[in-house]
Image (spheres, grey):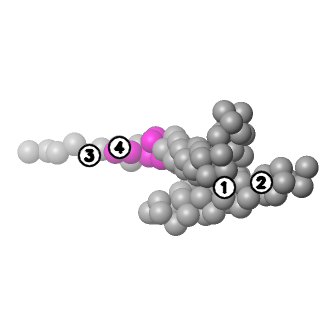
Amino acid sequence: MIDMLTTILWFIVVGAVIGALARLVVPGRNPIGILLTVLVGIAGAILGGVVADALGAGMLVAFVFAVVIAALGVAALTTMNTRGRGRGHGSRTRRRSY
């Protein structure tokens, strides 16, 4: 029981670190708050750890799964929120007069 609790706490720490690092890596303003980014990182890390445990993987593989799933979750969230802010969004295009 204590071993499982320790493992979940490690996944929470890993997810929080991945979420915080994602905020540092993405340049410019980000429409998502840091709390949401960290929470998505934590959820992804726990999900990755649970999936690895269900597959019967070892602790190292579970750690790698946790990092990968957390990073993918944060990247997907960031991509979804910045996709609509591309070229021409929110700004009017000027017509040239010759």
Please state the extent of the stretch shown in magenta in the rendering.
82-87
Residue under label 1, please give it. 15
Whichever of labels 4 and 1 marks the residue nearer the N terminus, that label is 1
For the residues bearing labels 3 and 4, Cβ distance under 8 angstroms = no
Numbered tag placed on residue 94 in the rendering: 3
Q: CA distance from mark 4 to mark 1?
A: 34 Å
Whichever of labels 2 and 3 marks the residue nearer the N terminus, that label is 2
Whichever of labels 3 and 1 marks the residue nearer the N terminus, that label is 1
Name the image quarter holding the C terminus: top left
Whichever of labels 3 and 4 marks the residue nearer the N terminus, that label is 4
Residue at 60% over, 47% down = 61
Q: Quadrant of residue 56?
A: top right
Residue at 30% over, 44% down = 93
Image position, residue 59 (x, y; %): 67, 50
Looking at the image, residue 92 lies above or below residue 25: above
Q: CA distance from mark 4 to mark 2?
A: 46 Å
Count of numbered circles in the view: 4
Q: Nearer the viewer, residue 42 or 61?
A: 61
Residue under label 2, please give it. 7
Q: Answer with left or right where residue 46 lies relative to residue 72.
A: right
Residue under label 4, please give it. 88
Nearer mark to the viewer, of 4 and 2: 2
Q: Amino acid at mark 4?
A: Gly
